Each structure stands twice: as structure tokens, then as C-alpha cells.
């Protein structure tokens, strides 16, 4: 006889497989689809006048992608049966910029002040993030459950931008910075300088996340189209500069060399 815990794990695994296959076979009304060179993916960052909720890159729909590759990427980080929602979310493809927020931080109501008015289905979304068992799945329609999932991702992003300004949060982002998880500066004269994520606005749904180079002090689009669809408000305008103030020894000297345009070897005259 199988124990109850094993049955629960089997049911959870079957549910994940069911969700993967269901989402590959249908397009939901809340989703806004964007065509990237004949590759259709769900858009994580809607325009201002688009529907408020869209499902993020959880189980992205990608044309001409093999079944095996898609399954590996969709459920990456969820090989363990007891993986938390936070670990699962942070290990999704495209979510490499996110760090894992401590449960204790999320459970402190003070840290979540003001978020309940910004996120619909707030209580259900919070339960989902904290892996609290809830019966709302039986009460809601499929579309409502999808909105709860989207709300959970939005809520986690708004919590994340606050957490990475704390001591523990900056330490977690330091490890990712050392591992080049945020990418390198594409500018030639920055010589592969590691970058930091930054938002151009602290208001949700205003702009997508960019990467900030501390050497040339400029911002660039992330190389991955998945990362480029993440809301910049989930990282904010403060983080990279507070990070470099905290770890001053990591701040490089400002780049002094720049490209000089020439014609037949002669510098162009500047009027």
C-alpha cells in the first residue's frame, strides 16, 4: 500500500503534467500574444491599455520547439516533489533575475503594506505563494484560477522589489551578481562587465526590466526575450545603486575609452 504522502506527490505531478499539456493546446483570453520572428509566446508585460492580467512565462507556448525541450524548460526547477512555489517560480526560464524571498519576510504583514489594494485576489495569491492549502480551486472557474496564478506572480514581483533592498535580499542578489546571472554589458569597451537589473520606473506596467552597467553607467535590454518581458517595477529604480553603495569594492572605475569614428583612417571633424 502506498502512503498518503506518496499519493499526494503523484497527484501533484499529474496535475503539473495536465497543466503543461492543457496550456500548450489552448490560448487564453487574458493572454496577449506577441510574434517574435514567427515564434509566438505569451507576453509577460502588457501595454498600458491591454488587459491587466496576463500569464507569465510559466509554460510558454513556443512554435517549432521539441516536446522534450519544452517539458524540460517548463518544469525546470520542479524536479523535486516538495519544491516550493517560490523556488519553482524563480527557476522558470526567464526568471533568472529573481531571488528567492524568505517566507518569514512574506509572512510579516508590515512588509506587504499597501499591496492588497494593488493586486486582485490578494489573499488567494498570497496563499499560493506561501504554499498554503486552499479550497479556492474548487470554487473558482478555470479562468479565475488563471487570474489567481497571474496575481500571485504580480504579488511576488511587488514583494521582491522591496525584499532586494533589505540586507538579506542584497546578499541574495550578490550571489547572483557573482554568478553573472544578470548578464554582462554588451558594450565592447566595458570588457564583459557584470550588470545589475534595474527598472526605469517604480510604477508597475510602465516599462520592462533593463540591465545596468556600473562601468559605463548606461542601461541595456536583456539578451533573453523572456527576461526582456519582465516588469521593471519588480526590481525598481533604486536597487543597482544601493547595491553598489553597499558593496563599494565591486564598483568598477568608470569607462574612459570610447569608439572613435574614422574615414580612411582620419577622425571625423566635429562641428
Image: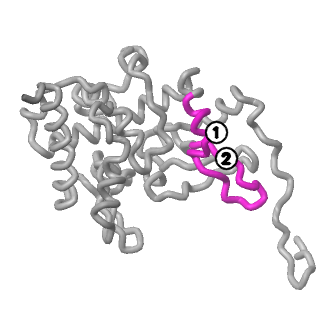
Q: Which mark is residue 178?
A: 1
Find the magenta span and give its range.
172-197
Along the line of sight, the residue nearer the viewer: 20 or 247: 20
Q: Which residue is located at x 47 percent, y 38 percent?
A: 98
- The residue sitting at the bottom extreme is 264
Q: Which residue is located at x 83 percent, y 61 percent?
A: 258
Task: Judge left or right: residue 48 versus residue 126.
Answer: right
Task: Judge left or right: residue 108 versus residue 223.
Answer: left
Front of the two marks 1 and 2: 1
Tag 2's secondary structure?
A: loop
Relative vertical location of residue 46 with respect to residue 161 in this rendering, above or below: below
Residues at circles 1 and 2 in contact by the CB criterion of under 8 Å: yes
Where is residue 44 drawn, in percent x and y?
37, 51
Task: Judge left or right: residue 224 versus residue 195.
Answer: left
Q: Which residue is located at x 34 percent, y 38 percent?
A: 153
Q: Which residue is mark 2?
A: 194
Q: Is residue 79 visible?
A: yes
- The residue sitting at the right extreme is 266
Amino acid at each position: 500500500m502506498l502512503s498518503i504522502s506518496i499519493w499526494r506527490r503523484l497527484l501533484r505531478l499529474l496535475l503539473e503534467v495536465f497543466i503543461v499539456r492543457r496550456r500548450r493546446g489552448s490560448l487564453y483570453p487574458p493572454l496577449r500574444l506577441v510574434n517574435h520572428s514567427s515564434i509566438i509566446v505569451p507576453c509577460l508585460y502588457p501595454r498600458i491599455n491591454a488587459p491587466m492580467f496576463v500569464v507569465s512565462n510559466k509554460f510558454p507556448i513556443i512554435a517549432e520547439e521539441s516536446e522534450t525541450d519544452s517539458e524540460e524548460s517548463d518544469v525546470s526547477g520542479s524536479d523535486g516533489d516538495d519544491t516550493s512555489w517560490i523556488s519553482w517560480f524563480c527557476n522558470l526560464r526567464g526568471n533568472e533575475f529573481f531571488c528567492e524571498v524568505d517566507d518569514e519576510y512574506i509572512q510579516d504583514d508590515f512588509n506587504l503594506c499597501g499591496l492588497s489594494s494593488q493586486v486582485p485576489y490578494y489573499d488567494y495569491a498570497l496563499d499560493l505563494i506561501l504554499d498554503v492549502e486552499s479550497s479556492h480551486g474548487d470554487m473558482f472557474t478555470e479562468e479565475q484560477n488563471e487570474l489567481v496564478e497571474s496575481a500571485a506572480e504580480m504579488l511576488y514581483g511587488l514583494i521582491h522589489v522591496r525584499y532586494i533592498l533589505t540586507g538579506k535580499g542584497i546578499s541574495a542578489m550578490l550571489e547572483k551578481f557573482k554568478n553573472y546571472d544578470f548578464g554582462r554589458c554588451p558594450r565592447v569597451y566595458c570588457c564583459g562587465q557584470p550588470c545589475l537589473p534595474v527598472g526605469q520606473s517604480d510604477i508597475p506596467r510602465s516599462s520592462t526590466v533593463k540591465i545596468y552597467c556600473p562601468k559605463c553607467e548606461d542601461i541595456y535590454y536583456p539578451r533573453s526575450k523572456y527576461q526582456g518581458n519582465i516588469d521593471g517595477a519588480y526590481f525598481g529604480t533604486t536597487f543597482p545603486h544601493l547595491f553598489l553603495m553597499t558593496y563599494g569594492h565591486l564598483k568598477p572605475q568608470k569607462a574612459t575609452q570610447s569608439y572613435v569614428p574614422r574615414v580612411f583612417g582620419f577622425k571625423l571633424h566635429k562641428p
